[in-house]
Image (cartoon, grey):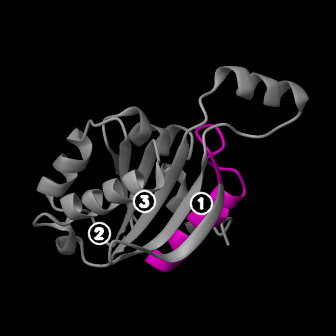
Amino acid sequence: MQIDDAIDAFERDILNGRARWVADLNETFRDHLVEGHRFRMCARGQTRGKGFILSRLFAWTVLPNYTVSLYAEAVRNSKDIVGGRLVELLRFIRRDMEKRGLKWAWLVLFLEGDPPSQVARSIETYDKNDIGIGGVNVHSGNVLVSNNLLGRSLVRQMRLDRLVPRLERGKGK
């Protein structure tokens, strides 16, 4: 499986409402530039979804209306993410969050191979509540996520762990 195929399928999933239990990500951008860095994909939206009269009323009265973004990064060589590269990506995202007034964000790394152990440990132990991090190996389908609500939502609600197996079965094209 190619990284580009996985990112295309993930974008289709988002536009088809895959993330709706967490956020209504209603627009996506390819090759999105943030502080001089080009993310492969960026999706934007808000936490208060739309729906029929009762669900809209419920959302309006109970749910916060946060603006959110999801950033996807293609990592063609897993060794490229070592040496502070993950911290640099998070810094770009944090600056964009401040600039746009975002409350939450996700960073999804599409990897060709498993990340080095220090990077995997950094992702899994990341516990700040404003950014969720996920990494998916596009060859094996292995997924690792940060240990916070947003990170876990990548598997629970967005079903990132099912992306590669579904594409390999031919259902995601």
Q: Position of residue 133 (x, y in %)?
A: 35, 50
Residue 166 numbered mark, or none:
1
| Point 17% across, 72% down: residue | 79
Q: Mark 2 points at which residue?
A: 113
What's under tag 2, amino acid-wise? Gly
Q: What element carries label 1?
A: helix
Q: Where is residue 150 in the image (x, y as percent from the top left)?
A: 43, 39
Q: Is residue 84 shown above or below 25? A: below
From which residue to which does the magenta span run? 1-25
The answer to which of 144 and 169 lies nearer the viewer is: 144
**69 left or right of 112 in image:** right
Check residue 18 for magenta coloring. yes
Q: Within 10 angstroms of label 3, few (less than 14), some, or many (20 or more) residues?
A: many
What's under tag 3, amino acid-wise? Gly
Q: Distance between the residues labelled 2 and 3?
A: 9 Å
Q: Within 10 angstroms of label 2, few (less than 14), some, or many (20 or more) residues?
A: some
Q: Which of marks 2 and 3 is nearer the N terminus?
A: 2
Q: Distance between the residues labelled 2 and 1?
A: 18 Å
Residue 88 numbered mark, or none:
none
What's under tag 1, amino acid-wise? Arg
